[in-house]
């Protein structure tokens, strides 16, 4: 095949640039390897995803992710491990590991900036988690812009970011939380039980804000256009938030379902972290039947980032359809 002189020159020029650039590209990783400076090797930018929901602006922030072993020890605990492995393999996923992602979100209504859950905070940063504040900055917000912090529930990966250095992380915010959830975790009856660690975390991260907190129940409003719905089981007072603006809808499902295959295709499969497993399964069916029937988008805290998608009914469960450009045009 004949190759023009111009092509040769362009190819050689590009190759030359590549050779010249290579030492500069490799310098930081090489220096980091020599000095053991891991900070220079981890330069990933904060992961955010922004889109419109009517007149609201939604920002999903990836607080971090981790790789966990043996999915069958977390999901489908009432099934044979081989059934869990087979379902993962059939859906092009590893059978022995899974990625758990954490996605707090901002709802900017124009009059309020509402943070739904707060991530791990400083307590997670040594493990590569607790990236919410960096994500907010990347999205154009400061912690002082947050006017409302709304909690789906009070597990540590949802409340860990409420305090920063012993002070409120969101000093201008008021708080919204479920009454049943707060009552459960603050009760001294949790002492000496498996829930004691969660009890202490709530005393440290949530109770200091009690006077600034509006405690809500089923059907109450977070702000105009955002309504709470009780979805218990994962925790006794777990809630989801239904946002609606200009006939566009999005449900923030928290931990109602924690895996896009294992929790949605088989909502009846038990999850180790669900405190009342039968109640959690009933809530999954209730919430995702609503979402599927009305074709509503949802943001699931542990769904694959950006954690937003739709579901359609499939057999006894639901097929997850991740969002693409629906909100952009």
Image: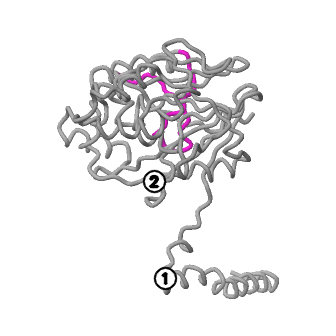
- Label 2 element class: helix
Q: At 54% across and 52% down in the image, what residue appears?
A: 165
User: What colouring method underlies this structural image?
Assistant: one colour
The image shows residue 31, relative to residue 144, as above or below, that is: below
The image shows residue 245, relative to residue 92, as above or below, that is: above
Q: At 32% across and 41% down in the image, what residue appears?
A: 197
- Label 1 element class: helix
Taking the magenta stretch, the answer to whether it contains residue 291 is no
Q: Position of residue 248 (x, y in %)?
A: 67, 21
Label 1 crowd bin: few (<14), some (14–19), many (20+), radius 10 Å: few
Q: At 56% across and 13% down in the image, what residue appears?
A: 220
- The magenta-colored residue range is 294-315
**107 relative to 240 in the view: left or right:** right
Q: Position of residue 211 (x, y in %)?
A: 55, 26
The part of the image, by quadrant, that contains residue 104 is top right
**239 relative to 167 in the view: left or right:** left
Q: Position of residue 160 (x, y in %)?
A: 47, 44
Label 2 crowd bin: few (<14), some (14–19), many (20+), radius 10 Å: some
Q: Count every numbered label the image shows and give the total.
A: 2
Q: Along the polypeptide, which appears first: circle 1 or circle 2?
A: 1
Q: Which mark is residue 33?
A: 1
Q: Nearer the viewer, mark 1 or mark 2?
A: 2
Which residue sits furthest top? 219
Q: Position of residue 274 (x, y in %)?
A: 31, 31
Residue occupied by mark 2: 124
């Amino acid at each position: 095949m004949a190759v023009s002189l111009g092509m040769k020159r362009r190819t050689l020029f590009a190759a030359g640039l590549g050779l010249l650039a290579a030492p500069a590209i490799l310098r930081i990783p090489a220096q980091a390897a020599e000095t053991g400076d891991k900070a220079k090797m981890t330069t990933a930018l904060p992961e955010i995803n922004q889109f419109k929901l009517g007149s609201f602006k939604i920002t999903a922030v990836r607080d971090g992710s981790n790789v966990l072993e043996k999915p069958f020890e977390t999901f489908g605990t009432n099934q044979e491990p081989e059934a869990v492995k087979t379902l993962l393999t059939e859906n092009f996923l590893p059978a022995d590991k899974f990625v758990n992602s954490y996605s707090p979100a901002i709802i900017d209504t124009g009059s309020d900036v509402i943070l739904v859950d707060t991530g791990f905070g400083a307590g997670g940063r040594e493990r590569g988690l607790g990236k919410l504040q960096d994500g907010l900055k990347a999205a154009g917000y400061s912690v002082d812009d947050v006017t409302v912090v709304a909690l789906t529930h009070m597990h540590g990966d949802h409340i860990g970011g409420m305090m920063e250095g012993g002070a409120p992380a969101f000093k201008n915010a008021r708080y919204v939380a479920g009454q049943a959830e707060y009552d459960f975790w603050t009760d001294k009856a949790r002492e000496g039980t498996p829930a004691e660690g969660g009890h202490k975390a709530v005393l440290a991260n949530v109770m200091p804000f009690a006077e600034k907190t509006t405690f809500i129940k089923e059907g109450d409003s977070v702000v105009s256009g955002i309504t709470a719905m009780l979805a218990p089981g994962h925790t006794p007072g777990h809630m989801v938030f239904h946002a609606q603006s200009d006939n566009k809808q999005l449900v923030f499902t928290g931990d109602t379902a924690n895996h896009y295959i294992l929790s949605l295709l088989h909502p009846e499969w038990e999850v180790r972290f669900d405190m009342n497993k039968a109640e959690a399964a009933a809530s999954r069916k209730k919430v995702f039947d609503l979402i599927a029937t009305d074709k509503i988008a949802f943001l699931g805290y542990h769904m694959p980032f950006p954690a937003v998608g739709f579901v359609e009914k499939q057999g006894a469960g639901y097929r997850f359809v991740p969002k693409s450009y629906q909100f952009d045009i």
